[in-house]
Structure formats: structure tokens, C-alpha cells
Image (spheres, grey):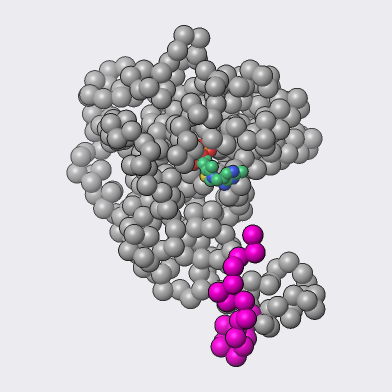
């Protein structure tokens, strides 16, 4: 990574932990103690995460889905970290880590139902696509406002500490989100309380069109941890085995009661921020292409094949299987009806107050064509 302008390693910075070679086929220096079955499952879930992205973006481009947000190229960061947690730990995620949910056994159909906001969606169509809610895997609902999950993780970790529990709170956030007020508040109080929280900063170099250097002057994001009184690690986020090594070390530290820890995982957003974005307008093309060559799935596959864990043909077969499973789920969910407009008013009050009941009846009447909406075509009042 030293050859990238974005992640130039200046003197004094923490080294970036790496296990797999960035290129080539010399795996003689690779060492780990991960059982073969786990390696295979890691590969499968990384491939499934990619397949979900590919189908989500395609459906959006075909006009069959309103919005999608990919994490393409960031699968190692997700699955390598997810591997290190226990089922009873709590996740406070951002929108760029669906693979963590898949690793924890999330129901793919439920995730796709969220993307369509249909009647099977446990969020009843009230969340943005890719903003999953899955309490059954200890996954807190994703918030669009950046950084809010960081304070939530600190609060939950503090509660776990007071109750004397062994579990930990894990939060994921981007490089841009590390500059929010909530990041400061969450990190600061986790440090003060020595709360069992793990902060994983997904440094993909960009906050939509803002490059890291335009929103943070620190030598590295890991440097920030010093000011909050917690140790930090930097790791190659495109190297799934390095992620396991780094996050294991961090989890051991946090679970032992020594306090929180900060991990800066270095990757690059090779995909658009979302289906609404065109990064070719602002990302240097050569840089993106260079990072596309560092695909974490291809890199892991080179190792798995070289180590005799699987053959090229088997990797291809898994790719096809994952694509099929995802396509079947999209086809199924595409045809599920949307929640009724009326249902927008449910779940807040046990008995709907009269003013809201009136609005509900009005909305239903407008939808049914019984009443003309006088406001239609009016300016949005802002
Ligand atoms: C508080 C807040 N400010 C701005 C936005 C608009 N916004 C949505 S995503 C995003 C970029 C976030 O970048 P980063 O934290 O690096 O995460 P990434 O998208 O790169 O994974 C911005 C500015 C928002 N959702 N919330
Ligand atoms: Mg980012």
C-alpha cells in the first residue's frame, strides 16, 4: 500500500498488519491457525456478499429496485472481523458491512425483503434499503445519520460492564464518520469508562466524494485513539487473514476487561458510494483501477488454491451457487406486495391520537382516489 498516495505510510505511523501477499503466488510467509472448514465458510460468505451487491446494483439499474448501496471490495474487512466475535456480542454497524450479518447467520431473504421494503420486511418498508434490522443476530438497526452507532455502542458496552457481562459491543464506521461529533463522544467516554467496546474504522479513503485528506489532518485515523486513551491497530482490510489476526487481538484485549480498542482497517471504495453516485467524476481512475487489482476475494482465492484448500473450479462453482441463491431471493421478494400506506401509522401509539387518525383516513382516501390532494404540485415547504 505504500505505493498509494491515499495511504502513504509516513514515518511514525503504525505499521499496517498484513498476512497474505498483495500480489503473486508466493504464500511461503503465510501462517495462521484457522481450521479448513472455517476458511471455506469465510470464502463462501465473502462470495455471497459480493453476489448480493452484484444483484442489488443490477436490479437498481434495471429500475426494479429503488436504491442499493454496495460494499464491493470490502468483503475481507467484513468477514475477517465477523469471524472473531461471539453470537452474544452486539453489533452496531454502518451500512457498509452486510457481510458481517451474513456471517452471523442473517436470513438472506429478510435482507432482500428490506431492500424492496415489502410486506415481508421486518422494518415494514420504513427503512432505507440496505439498512438492516436483525435483533436475532444481535444486530442493531442501521441509522443513516453517520456516527450515531458509535455512541450507542459505547452506551451498550457501559451497560454490559455494569452488569458484569463477558460480551462486547462492536461498532463499524467509515473514515468520514470518524470526524463526527458522535465519534468523539463515543470514543471519549469508552476510554474514560474502560468500556468493553471495539471500534472498527473502515477506512476506504472516501466519504462519498470527499477524500480522506480533505476531512482529516491526522497522520492516520488510528492515531486518534491515543487521545482517547485506548490502543490501536492498523490492518490491511483487503487481507482476510490479517483481519482475523488483528481483530482477534483486539477482541482479546476488550473482552479481558482492559478497556476499548480501535482498529483502522485500510481498504478502498472501488464501487460507487451508492446507486445514486458516479465516482468516475471525482475518483482518480488510475487509483481505482489499481485497487480493483487488489480484490480481496481474488487474493484469498489465490491462497486457498495454492494451499490446496480448494480448486479454481470449486471457487467458480461457489460463485455460481451464491449468484443463484441471491437471484432466487430477489425474484421472490420482487413480487411480494408492499405494506399498505395505512400501516405507516402503526406501532407508535397503542391508540392513534385523533389528529393522526384523521391524517391516516385522509391519506387512504387520497390513495383510493376518493379525495383530491389539494397540496399536490405544491412546493416542498423548505
Ligand atoms: C451526520 C451525517 N452527515 C452527512 C451524511 C451524508 N452522508 C451519507 S454517507 C456519507 C459518507 C460517509 O463516509 P464514510 O463514513 O467514510 O463511510 P463510507 O460511506 O465510505 O463507507 C455522507 C457524508 C449523513 N448520512 N449523516
Ligand atoms: Mg469512507
Residue 133 shown left or right of residue 165 in the figure: left
Residue 192 shown left or right of residue 380 in the figure: right
| Residue 87 screen position, x and y as percent | 58, 43
Residue at x 51% of width, y 61% of height: 114
Q: Dividing the picture into quarters, in which one does residue 373 lie?
A: bottom right
Residue 331 shown left or right of residue 78 in the figure: left
Residue at x 44% of width, y 62% of height: 66
| Residue 178 screen position, x and y as percent | 58, 32
Residue 74 shown left or right of residue 150 in the figure: left
- View quadrant of ligand 1: top right
Which quarter of the rendering shows the C terminus? bottom right
Q: Residue furthest left?
A: 313
Residue at x 30% of width, y 24% of height: 22
Relative to residue 331, is residue 36 depicted above or below? above
**Would residue 79 be visible to someone looking at this image?**
no
Q: Dividing the picture into quarters, in which one does residue 238 lie?
A: top left
Q: Residue furthest top?
A: 11
Please check the rendered image and state whether residue 369 is part of the magenta-colored stretch, yes or no: yes
Q: Dividing the picture into quarters, in which one does residue 272 lie?
A: top left
Amino acid at each position: 500500500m505504500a505505493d498509494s498516495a491515499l495511504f502513504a505510510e509516513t514515518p511514525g505511523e503504525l505499521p499496517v498488519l498484513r498476512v497474505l501477499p498483495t500480489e503473486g503466488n508466493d504464500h511461503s510467509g503465510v501462517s495462521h491457525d484457522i481450521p479448513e472448514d472455517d476458511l471455506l465458510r469465510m470464502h463462501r460468505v465473502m462470495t455471497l456478499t459480493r453476489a448480493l451487491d452484484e444483484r442489488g446494483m443490477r436490479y437498481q439499474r434495471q429500475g426494479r429496485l429503488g436504491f442499493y448501496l454496495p460494499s464491493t471490495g470490502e468483503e475481507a474487512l467484513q468477514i475477517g472481523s465477523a469471524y472473531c466475535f461471539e453470537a452474544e456480542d452486539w453489533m452496531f454497524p454502518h451500512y457498509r458491512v452486510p457481510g458481517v450479518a451474513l456471517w452471523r447467520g442473517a436470513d438472506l431473504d429478510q435482507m432482500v425483503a428490506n431492500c424492496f421494503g415489502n410486506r415481508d420486511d421486518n422494518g415494514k418498508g420504513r427503512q432505507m434499503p440496505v439498512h438492516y434490522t436483525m435483533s436475532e443476530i444481535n444486530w442493531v438497526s442501521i441509522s443513516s445519520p453517520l456516527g450515531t452507532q458509535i455512541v450507542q455502542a459505547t452506551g451498550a458496552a457501559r451497560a454490559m460492564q455494569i452488569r458484569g457481562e463477558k460480551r462486547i459491543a462492536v461498532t463499524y464506521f467509515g473514515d468520514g464518520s470518524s470526524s463526527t461529533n458522535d465519534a468523539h463522544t463515543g470514543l471519549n467516554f469508552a476510554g474514560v469508562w474502560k468500556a468493553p467496546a471495539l471500534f472498527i474504522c473502515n477506512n476506504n479513503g472516501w466519504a462519498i466524494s470527499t477524500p480522506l485528506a480533505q476531512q482529516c489532518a491526522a497522520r492516520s485515523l488510528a492515531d486518534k485513539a491515543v487521545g482517547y486513551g485506548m490502543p490501536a491497530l492498523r490492518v490491511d482490510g483487503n487481507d482476510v487473514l490479517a483481519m482475523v489476526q488483528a481483530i482477534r487481538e483486539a477482541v482479546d484485549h476488550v473482552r479481558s476487561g482492559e478497556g476499548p480498542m480501535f482498529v483502522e482497517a485500510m481498504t478502498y471504495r472501488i464501487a460507487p458510494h451508492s446507486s445514486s453516485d458516479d465516482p468516475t467524476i471525482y475518483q482518480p481512475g488510475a487509483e481505482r483501477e489499481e485497487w480493483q487489482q487488489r480484490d480481496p476475494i481474488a487474493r484469498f482465492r489465490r491462497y486457498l488454491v495454492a494451499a490446496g484448500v480448494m480448486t479454481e473450479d470449486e471457487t467458480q462453482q461457489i460463485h455460481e451457487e451464491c449468484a443463484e441463491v441471491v437471484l432466487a431471493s430477489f425474484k421472490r421478494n420482487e413480487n411480494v406486495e408492499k405494506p399498505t400506506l395505512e400501516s405507516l401509522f402503526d406501532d407508535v401509539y397503542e391508540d392513534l391520537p385523533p389528529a393522526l387518525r384523521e391524517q391516516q383516513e385522509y391519506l387512504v382516501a387520497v390513495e383510493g382516489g376518493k379525495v383530491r390532494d389539494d397540496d399536490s404540485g405544491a412546493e416542498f415547504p423548505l
